[in-house]
Image (spheres, coloured by chain):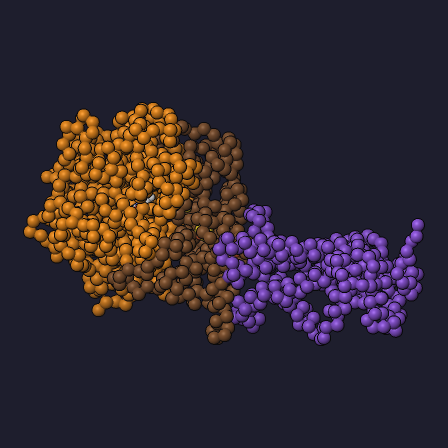
Chain colours: A purple, B orange, C brown
Amino acid sequence: MTDGQGFLQRHYHLLRRLHSLAGVVPIGAFMIIHLTTNSSVVWGALNGRAHIAESAAGRGIETFQHEVHFINNLPLLLLTEIGVLWLPIAFHAILGVAFALTGSNNVSRYGYQGNKRYALQRLTGYIGFLFIVYHVATLRWGWSFLTPAGTTWSHYYAASTLAAALKGAAGQWSVAGVIVSIGYFIGVSALVFHFANGLWTAAITWGLTISQAAQRRWGYVCSCVGAVLMLAGWSALAGFLFVADYDEAVQIEERMVEQMYGHEYLLELKEKFADRPEIGRSAVRQAATRPYPGPAPLIEE
Amino acid sequence: MTSTNQRVIIVGGGLAGLAAAIRVAEAGLPVDLFSMVPVKRSHSVCAQGGINACNEVARQQGYSEYQHFDETIYGGDFLADQGPVLEMANWAPKIIDLLDRMGVPFNRTAEGRRDLRLFGGSLFKRTHFSGATTGQQLLYALDEQVRRFEAEGKVSKYEFWEFLRPILVGQGDQRRCVGIVAQDMRTMQIRPFRADAVVMATGGCGLIFGKSTNSVICTGGAASRCYQAGAWYGNAEMIQVHPTAIPGADKCRLMSESARGEGGRVWVPRKKGDTRRPKDIPENERWYFLEERYPAYGNLVPRDIATREIFDVCVNEGMGIDGQNMVYLDLTHKDPDYLTEKLGGIMEIYEKFVGVDPRYEPMKIFPSVHYSMGGLWTTFTPGAYQPAEPAGKHEPGMIPPVGTEVGQGMAYGAPNNMMTNIAGLYAFGEVNFAYHGATRLGANALLSCIFDGLFNGVSVVNYVREGVPSTQPAESLEAACFDEASSAEQAKYDGLLATVGTNERDEKFNPYVIAREMGEEMTAASTVVKTGPRLEQCLAKLAELRERYARVQLSDSAGWTNQSLSFARAVGDMLILAEVIAKAGLLREESRGSHKRLDFPDRDDERFGKASVAEFDPATGEHRIFWRDVQTNLVKPRPRTYGKVESDQKGKQEPVGSAG
Amino acid sequence: MGNGANSGGRTRNVVFRIKRCDGPGKPSRWEAFRVPVEPNANVISCLNWIAAHPVTMDGRPTTPVVWDSNCLEEVCGACTMVINGRVRQSCSCLIDEYAPNDGDTITLEPMSKFPVVRDLWVDRQRLFEGLKKVKAWAPIDGTYSLGDGPRESPAQQHVRYALSTCMSCGCCLEACPQYLKEEDASKWDTAFVGAAIISQARLFNEHPTGAILKDDRLDALLGVGGINDCGNAQNCVRVCPKDIPLTESIAAIGRAATIHGFKRFFRGA
Ligand SMILES: Cc1cc2nc3c(=O)[nH]c(=O)nc-3n(C[C@H](O)[C@H](O)[C@H](O)COP(=O)(O)OP(=O)(O)OC[C@H]3O[C@@H](n4cnc5c(N)ncnc54)[C@H](O)[C@@H]3O)c2cc1C
Ligand code: SF4
Ligand code: SF4
Ligand code: FES
């Protein structure tokens, strides 16, 4: 027996349980926060404290951008990110794949609901992982060649970048954008399912729910959690795709930067991101580069 | 000096075989356990109703171990040797305790004690049960203990191995059993195994009757092979037909006596050919014939009686449901939840196999062959209790004439207990002819199986440690006798294989066809009611079948997992045993217990208060049947009537002898 | 006895498609048989008929089909096979239910998770080895008279009785996506034990005497191939013919494993 196998065998239970735990905390917990943040682009419309934007949609963008700034100003962000996200996700994914390979689906013969969920859990694991890699690579590591519009991530322009990254261009749809958007839809849905179902099975694994009745009840709870998160995910997506106006977003973002860091900083930033391709291709590029004209003029009859 | 390499072979992993394995292994002798199926799947798994033993509650109502003994002897119509039965009844409570310790999930009372139910042949609740799958639960408990010994290396299992013959050495007094020949049912390898003692625990022979309540392996083949090797076969004619079973295409599925023990009532419509649905027939238009004829025991008369009454109602009076051979077994007046709790196992069987829920609709049942009281003849050393006068009927509340100390009925550890007429060859469980006489009481079989294993397992150990094997262990014997026996079986096997392709697949020589005809004939001639002429006709038919069997033809020449060969080989052995059953039935010119001769309706203690013993003549293939006295010095034989009243006018018939 | 109901005679035919294999390492093939159906017929009675008349539908003589069975009333577990794509006992499989019309087809295959011995007969020894692995027994002090066993409430008896009806048939293993065929006996120790074994471990943990070995059982189940290999597909509980609450057993052992794991972690094994 090689050492690796020996290690696995000796600590099998620990590894299995850590795998289960990692899925819930921190990964699951992070996902809840992340989706809450992102969906703020929609529910932010109700945010009374947003004061920069005028329209409801704008308030959403502002709320979202606010959250993003908050997160990005956390101390030791990179370290936390690595420790709380990258490592657990890598661990969960690698072990997950290893474990998934020990099974063989038989849904075609035994089409029970539970069995379908079992199969889906594995499938969504694979999909979700690929999606996370893409998501992070494009929006965090700046592998802009993977995005249809070559977006470069900047958290100062979070909302507008996202909208562009999804649609494939600033402001309007492109074919590639549709594909990416569908990809996001599937990816987010898969991850939410994976989490909700994982939450349900974790309760069995850890022995929290024993009786069939308890498992069923917990199943309802997990379904609700899943439904809420699914809504959050979808609404965020819809928010960026259909509600958030690219130009309005950029304007709000820039005003927020100005407010927080001063005009100097904004100019520096604009300089740095002047060549953002999607901005270059924007139909209202001109308007965007002009200083903020202040509130829109009232249109008189 | 005992050899360190002494071993015991146990053939059969039902309750009897497993109990024996545990006892022998516990005593430190290595055990080789043979079974045609994984022992956990042995036929004992089918037993439903329960296991009898005196208990505190019954005791305080006037019951006793002694009364259990008396009931068993009376139920068996005074054909059983009495000492072993007394010992068994005395041991019964200890057996329940032991099973309880092993973790058998017996049903419980509110206070957490073992619950009890009524069973046939007794007016006291003395049957312990685990739902309606008691046999399964007991078998599993013993199986688990054997697995524990197996894990410790004290028991070696040979599952999917078929016993082919015992290996004997010596002549006359010196003759003893020193091993067996067996065949791996997968690889078809045939080889000898040495042992200082061999315990046969191979169960019953229901398949001789075609469809019965028995399992597929209950061919009686193993017993027949011992018989052909020289072991005696006792009381072959005593075959129990169970009153309540569901007829099926492959077997008859038992509806346990516990259904009646829990309140089930047997009835038919009073009006012949009444086509109304059972629920639409009002109470006063139902004929509860058992309750009417046997006010004291009602539906819980012993099996032979219930069977004959049902048979009588259907066949003679034509009163069966829709004119068919069926009567109702009705539990619908009971609370459905109560039924699920107490009888879940059989409720499920009925539902699964008939598609009707017996909680709401009366079951339709008919008698079926169930159990063989007869089996390999065995002996024993009588115990300490030897009254000057045999006792009369024991009434509840009377002080028993004897205590429950070990050894009152049968001497504990005597090497010859339950040994056949061949030294070193024992028979335990259903294959043993002891204990049940002419009829077995419900829930006594499980008891006798486990009792055999536990009580007489010690005898096996003592025989091996102190008897001939202690000076001449099997391992020291020449290989020749083992190889010879093995080659003989190999030749038989090769011979059967060589029949493939002969006779152009003529139906007449098809082993399955021969077996079916044997089953039909035996069921028709040698079960509920018998007559001399019919039995003679049956013997003639069996002779014809044996002739045809001599030219039997197989359709599979494979040298690997040849199941049909194994079956065909067993058919030959079954035919021989069938002859013994029919012939002993013909010669027993009386009616006793399950054996009902219409031409000899009364019990005849003078001529037949004896066990029939059959001996095989290998030279001619004939059976010699002789009669041996039965030990009856503990209880005096008395008429067995179960208080029958003749409700109808023809009742001038005296209630003597076996109930009609 | 009991032939009264069978006087109706044979009325219709059913076609059996059977996946056959002559032995380990031999190729599989399909053979079809046309079988007349008796009243109350089940798969076993049809297989019996084929054994007596081993001729395929196209008139070619063949060998009798080999299968495993014993009790014929669904309590021994022997006759498990895959019928019309689903695992179940063949003795309780009624033809009237599966093939109500003349000419209907029933497909029989051996279980796929166990090595085939021949035709429909598979080798389920791994299941019994699993029972050894988790020490599925109560370690009593021997068979001599030592009084009765521990008292037990009816509620507790219900729990144990339900678990104790497991007949080691293997349905739950056949349907489990985590339970894979393993021909090599030396690997059984680290291959998934399956729901039946986990449930048996629980059965004995629930018994006061059995519980003495609880730690041993959990140690065995914490390793590779133990409780953690379950993927919670819950097929097992759906196919179990005895309606054993297998998923409850899995959760209960999961809980015990959680506690045991922590204890072991902090105390050191
Ligand atoms: C449906 C049914 C219900 C019953 N209910 C009750 C009840 O409620 N109470 C009660 O007391 N009794 C009951 N009985 C009777 C009782 O179950 C049996 O008498 C008893 O189980 C027999 O056990 P055994 O150990 O003698 O043999 P079995 O359990 O029959 O086992 C025989 C063993 O021998 C092996 N074997 C056979 N032939 C060979 C061979 N050639 N080579 C190798 N091995 C061989 C088999 O593999 C098997 O392991 C019932 C019987 C039936 C049929
Ligand atoms: S719940 Fe576990 S044991 Fe049951 S089928 Fe699913 S993976 Fe297999
Ligand atoms: S748990 Fe159920 S399906 Fe699994 S082996 Fe036991 S009885 Fe069969
Ligand atoms: S033969 Fe026993 S379960 Fe089918």
On screen, B651 above or below B7? above
Residue at x 50% of width, y 74% of height? C266
Where residue C89 sits: x, y (%)? 45, 45
Residue at x 42% of width, y 32% of height? C39
Q: Is residue B208 visible?
A: no
- C223 sits left or right of B625 in the view: right
Q: Is residue B272 visible?
A: yes
Residue at x 26% of width, y 38% of height? B299
Residue at x 27% of width, y 49% of height? B127
Q: Quadrant of residue B356?
A: top left
Q: Quadrant of the N terminus of chain B?
A: bottom left
Q: Quadrant of the C terminus of chain B?
A: top left
Where residue C20 sits: x, y (%)? 50, 44
Where residue C35 sits: x, y (%)? 47, 34
Where residue B60 sits: x, y (%)? 20, 52
Towards the viewer: B88 or B416: B88
The total number of labels drawn is 0
Towards the viewer: B557 or B656: B656
Towards the viewer: C113 or C185: C113
Judged from this view, the residue extending furthest toward the left is: B388
